[in-house]
Image: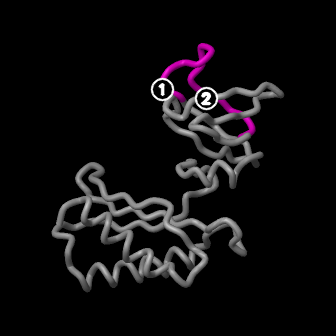
Amino acid sequence: MAKEEILSLVTNILKEYISDKELEVYRVQYKKEGPDWILRIMLDKPIGAQSEYINIDECENATRYLSDKLDELDVIDRSYRLEVSSPGLDRELTKDSDYKRFAGRLVNINTYEPINEKKHFSGILIGKENSVVSIDIEGEKLEIPEKKISKINLEIIF
């Protein structure tokens, strides 16, 4: 089975699994890392869920369900390692809804090319509009076109 078909199949299995749970699919990856193939699943809580974070039991239950389903279907013709987790506290912002959900939070942004002679920025997320991400850096608004951003993630504050 081709990589794209595996990703589609796994996504559909996950959608079936989470249909009656306060979970959503954040990311599905199937890729080679070193000598191993990894099927990496990240689940998240939707906006408005009772809890903001995934717990270990939810990851374990999803792992068991997905593992059993994939064993039953037997469509992946090579050995792989299955990983199910949450995006974590330092999650990468990947969806438009993430920019609304995490507005007001501290983010780190890396860019492909320098902006004002810098490629790393840390500031309070204002939001994203018309493919432009806005952050507040010590009272100054900085707008960065989305196409120039290599990575944007939440910063962990202790």
**Dot 2: few (<14), some (14–19), or many (≥20) neighbours within 10 Å?**
some
Q: Position of residue 85 (x, y in %)?
A: 50, 65
Mark carried by residue 112? 1
Which of the two residues, 10 or 40, is positioned nearer the viewer here?
Answer: 10
Question: Is residue 146 rendered magenta in the image?
Answer: no
Q: Given this view, does label 1 or label 2 mark the residue nearer the observer?
A: 2
Quadrant of the rendering where the N terminus is positioned:
bottom left
Amino acid bearing label 1: Tyr
Measured from the top left, where is residue 34 in percent x and y? 27, 49
Q: Which residues are magenta?
A: 111-125
Please give the residue where the numbered disc 2 appears in the rendered image: 144
Which residue appears farthest toward the top when viewing the image?
A: 117
Would you identify the image quadrant in which residue 69 lies?
bottom left
Q: Secondary structure at mark 2?
A: strand
Q: How far apart are labels 1 and 2 at the CA level?
A: 11 Å
Residue at 19%, 61% (x, y): give it: 2
User: In the image, what residue occupies the spot 49% across and 32% down?
Assistant: 147
Q: How far across and down, in percent of the image, does residue 66 sit?
A: 38, 78
Where 138 falls versus 7 (above or below)?
above
